[in-house]
Amino acid sequence: MYRQPGWPLSNGHVVRSHMEASLCQYLTGVKEAHVHATPEALSFSVVIAPKRHALYVPSIVLTQTRSDKRTIIIEPVDSVRPGGGVRRLQGFRKAHHADYFLIVVARRALRPHIPDDAYDLFVPLEDFLPLDNFLTAL
């Protein structure tokens, strides 16, 4: 069963992690319209291994900005250990790359451990400038 989101922020958005809260506050500050997905609103069954599927619920979906007509998803990653979600991202991106642009936000130290096929753009948690530059260029 899917674990329900954690807590509401002052802007009314419900977040599931501190990293998601930081991203939400950043996106709100730069006036980037977004939603926090729920299993009822947006979820995917993705292949994570042969004959194994997992539920993937995006953390943040931009509602107005697109990249080459693809919906932009921003996913905070705080672990590369099994169960941390990286295999879900790989399965999601493999199945839905044509329709979604996936941005992973994680600590710089995790970057070498996150496979390139798990994201379209990597943004270090310590510096949102690459995300800002990407959004500005669209």
Image (cartoon, grey):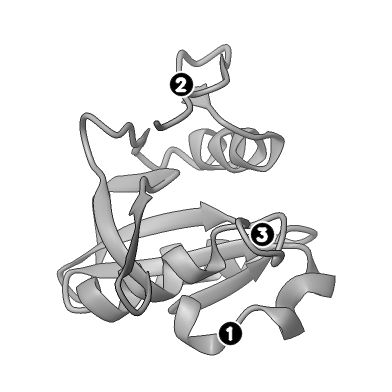
Residue 20 percent location from the top left of the image:
59, 40
Q: In the rendered structure, find residue 128 and report the number of the disc placed on it.
A: 3
Gap between marks 3 and 2, in whole Å?
A: 20 Å
Q: Judge the density around disc 3: few (<14), some (14-19), many (≥20) Cα neighbours within 10 Å.
A: some
Q: Amino acid at mark 1?
A: Pro
Q: In this rendering, does residue 138 appear at all?
A: no
Residue lying at 84% horizontally and 73% vertically, measured from the top left: 109
Answer left or right for 105 relative to 102.
right
How many discs appear? 3
| Element on which disc 1 rests | loop
Q: Amino acid at mark 2?
A: His
Residue 37 percent location from the top left of the image:
34, 36
Residue position marked by numbered label 2 in the rendering: 13
Mark 3 or 1: in front is 1
| Element on which disc 2 rests | loop
Residue lying at 80% horizontally and 59% vertically, measured from the top left: 126
Q: Is residue 80 depicted above or below 25 in this figure?
A: below
Quadrant location, the C terminus? bottom left
Q: Is residue 42 depicted above or below 38 in this figure?
A: below
Residue lying at 29% horizontally and 34% vertically, measured from the top left: 39
Q: Earlier in the sequence, mark 3 or mark 2?
A: 2
Task: Tell which of 37 and 39 is nearer to you.
Answer: 39
Residue 34 placement: quadrant: top left
Q: Amino acid at mark 3?
A: Phe
Q: Earlier in the sequence, mark 2 or mark 1?
A: 2
Residue position marked by numbered label 1 in the rendering: 115
